[in-house]
Amino acid sequence: MQKNYQPTAACQFLIASNCLMFAFRLMGFFPEATLAYGIFQTIGLPLYILFSVVFGKQGNNFSGNLMIIFGIMFYGELGIVNIISSAGISTDTCILGIPFIVCGIAATLAMIPLRYDAAVSFISWFTLHIWMLFTGIWFLLPDSYILYLVNVIFGLLDGVLFTYMCAAELTKTVGWNLPMGRPMFGRKYASDEN
């Protein structure tokens, strides 16, 4: 019996790429790449809308809604602001701060259904949502060195974790199973016992 297509590896690849690019740009690498980064992010938005539709058609509304949240925040809004900034038009980071905070809080609360996922998956998504929250606060308080460090650390951490999750999804197709850890809060699903 063939399983439905799950675009999880593609989602994880895009998230890992975005997290690492964000962290590297905060550390001062690629200062002239604002336009390229904005274009990459803007191209990611239609992909995330497509992922959302795929998950929704399969009845996985949770993942579908999560894809819309990430698509709009990471790829839509942030991408457009980067493109505008590359044209030399100054933007107020507060326009990013409030939505990122709201999105971070909402996405962190959405972790409740993911509590039975494997440890690597749960930790990856949880730290990504916390990072969104801290990114929003940093956009409101851009002079805070502590928030800057938190953003760099979480960006690098999430980039590595999502790269690993992407590799784990891809290696499943050839029969390899990279360790993802046991669920942190009990067994994953009752059907996993079969």
Image: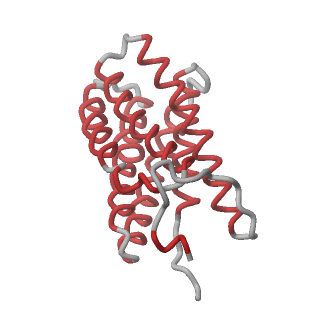
Task: Name above or below for residue 39 compared with residue 34.
Answer: below
Render colour scheme: secondary structure
Name the residue at 62% across, 54% down: 166
Q: How many marks?
A: 0
Relative vertical location of residue 131 with respect to residue 169 in this rendering, above or below: above
**Quarter where residue 25 is shown:** top right
Which corner quadrant of the image does residue 60 belong to? bottom left
Of residues 9 and 113, which is closer to you in this image? 113
| Near-viewer residue (182 or 18) | 182
The correct choice, above or below, for 185 with respect to 6 in the image is above
Most extreme residue toward the bottom is 1
Give the quarter of the figure containing the C terminus.
bottom right
Horizontal and vertical percent position of residue 191: 49, 74
Q: Residue at x 61, y 50 (%)?
A: 181
Please determine whether, in this image, residue 51 is positioned above or below residue 111. Answer: below
Residue at (47%, 25%) from the top-left corner? 151
Q: Estimate the x, y position of residue 123 in percent, counting from the top left.
A: 50, 42
* Residue that appears at 38% across and 64% down: 52
Residue 74 on image: x %, y %: 41, 43
Q: Is residue 84 left or right of residue 157?
A: left
Picture coordinates of residue 45 (x, y %)? Answer: 41, 54
Name the quarter where the N terminus is drawn: bottom right
